Image (cartoon, rainbow, N blue to C red):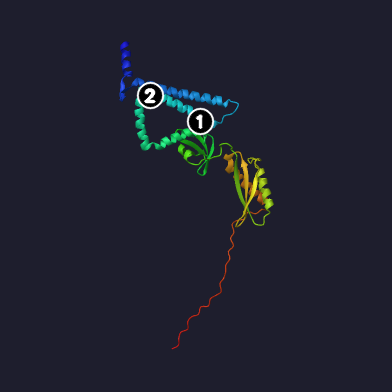
C-alpha cells in the first residue's frame, strides 16, 4: 500500500517542465485548475446574490448598474483565481514578472488593439457611458446594447442583427445614447403644403394628429413651426416628444400616415416639385447671301 502511495506521489510531483528554476508538476497544475474553477463558481454565486439583493431593494437599481457590478466581480475573481492558481503551480513573483515581461513585448508588437479594447471595457463598466439595455445609434441603425465583454460589446439592431463592436469605439468616438439620463426624445416630422393653403388650418390639423397619438407625450406639448417659403411649398415641421425612443421610426411613420389622411379630409394639398420654364424667342436674323460680282 505504501509503495502505491509512494508511486502516486512520485507521479503527482513529477516535473512536467521548468520555468527558470521552478519545476511545474502535475499535482501543482491539477490544484491550480481546481482553484481556478472554484474561483469561477464563487464568482457565479456572488453575482447571483448581488443581483437578487439589488432587485429586492426599495429603491430600484437599473439593470445596467447590476450588470456592471457583476462584470467587475467576475473579473476580480478571475484575476484572483489566476494568481492563486499560479502560486499553486509554482510560479512566484519573479517568474510572473519574467512572464509578463515577455507578454509586454508581445503587446508592443501586435496586441495594442486588444489591450486598448480591454481597458476601454473596464472604463465602460466603471464610468457607464453605455450600459446594457441602452438604446444607441450605430451608423444609420438604432440598436440595443446586449452585453459588454472584455474585448467587445454586443449590440442588436431592430432588424434582429447582432453587431460586435470593439470597446474602444465607444471611448474614442461620439456615441448617441437615448437611454442615458432622460429617455425622452423629440421627433421631427417635416411636411410641405401648397401655396395658398390656410396656414392656421394646417397648424391645427398637425397638432390634432399629434395629440391623438398615444405614444406622443403631452408634456412637453407638440409644436408646429413654419419653417420657410420653399420653391414649391410652404414648409412646416411638426415636433413631438416621446418617452419610448425605440419606437421613434414607427411613431414617425404613423404620424405621416395620419397627416396624409387628415390633409385629404380637409382638402389641404401637398404639392409636388414644380418648375416654371420661360422660353424667350429671339427675332429671326436675315441671312444675306453675298451677291456674285458681275464680270
Q: Residue furthest top?
A: 1
Q: Quadrant of residue 232?
A: bottom right
Q: Is residue 59 above or below residue 162?
A: above
Q: At x 46% / y 35%, what residue is drawn?
A: 120
CB of mark 2 within 8 Å of CB of mark 1? no
Q: At x 60% / y 49%, what residue is drawn?
A: 190
- The residue under label 2 is 86
Around disc 1, counting alpha carbons within 10 Å, would you say few (fewer than 14), some (14 to 19), or many (20 or more)? many
Q: Position of residue 142 (x, y in %)?
A: 53, 41
Q: Quadrant of residue 56?
A: top right
Q: Nearer the viewer, residue 277 or 180?
A: 180
Q: Is residue 187 above or below residue 100?
A: below
Gap in angstroms between the C-alphas marked 2 and 1: 27 Å
- The residue under label 1 is 68
Q: Nearer the viewer, residue 271 or 83?
A: 83
Residue 92 located left or right of residue 240: left
Residue 240 located left or right of residue 155: right
Amino acid at each position: 500500500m505504501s509503495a502505491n502511495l509512494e508511486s502516486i506521489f512520485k507521479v503527482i510531483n513529477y516535473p512536467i517542465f521548468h520555468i527558470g528554476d521552478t519545476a511545474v508538476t502535475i499535482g501543482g497544475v491539477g490544484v491550480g485548475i481546481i482553484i481556478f474553477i472554484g474561483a469561477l463558481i464563487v464568482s457565479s454565486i456572488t453575482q447571483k446574490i448581488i443581483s437578487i439583493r439589488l432587485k429586492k431593494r426599495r429603491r430600484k437599481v437599473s439593470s445596467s448598474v447590476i450588470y456592471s457590478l457583476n462584470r467587475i466581480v467576475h473579473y476580480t475573481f478571475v484575476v484572483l483565481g489566476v494568481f492563486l492558481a499560479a502560486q499553486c503551480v509554482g510560479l512566484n513573483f519573479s517568474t510572473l514578472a519574467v512572464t509578463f515581461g515577455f507578454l509586454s513585448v508581445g503587446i508592443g508588437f501586435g496586441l495594442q488593439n486588444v489591450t486598448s479594447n480591454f481597458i476601454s471595457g473596464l472604463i465602460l463598466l466603471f464610468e457607464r457611458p453605455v450600459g446594457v439595455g441602452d438604446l444607441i445609434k450605430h451608423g444609420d441603425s438604432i440598436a440595443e446594447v446586449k452585453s459588454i465583454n472584455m474585448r467587445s460589446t454586443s449590440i442588436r439592431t431592430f432588424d434582429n442583427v447582432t453587431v460586435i463592436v470593439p470597446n474602444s469605439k465607444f471611448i474614442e468616438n461620439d456615441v448617441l445614447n437615448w437611454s442615458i439620463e432622460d429617455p425622452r426624445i423629440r421627433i421631427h416630422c417635416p411636411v410641405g403644403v401648397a401655396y395658398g393653403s390656410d396656414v392656421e388650418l394646417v397648424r391645427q390639423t398637425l397638432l390634432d394628429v399629434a395629440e391623438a397619438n398615444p405614444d406622443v407625450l403631452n408634456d412637453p406639448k407638440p409644436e408646429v413651426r413654419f419653417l420657410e417659403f420653399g420653391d414649391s411649398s410652404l414648409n412646416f415641421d411638426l415636433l413631438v416628444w416621446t418617452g419610448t425612443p425605440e419606437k421613434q421610426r414607427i411613431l414617425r411613420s404613423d404620424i405621416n400616415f395620419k397627416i396624409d389622411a387628415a390633409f385629404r379630409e380637409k382638402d389641404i394639398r401637398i404639392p409636388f416639385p414644380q418648375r416654371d420654364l420661360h422660353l424667350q424667342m429671339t427675332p429671326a436674323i436675315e441671312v444675306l447671301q453675298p451677291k456674285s460680282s458681275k464680270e
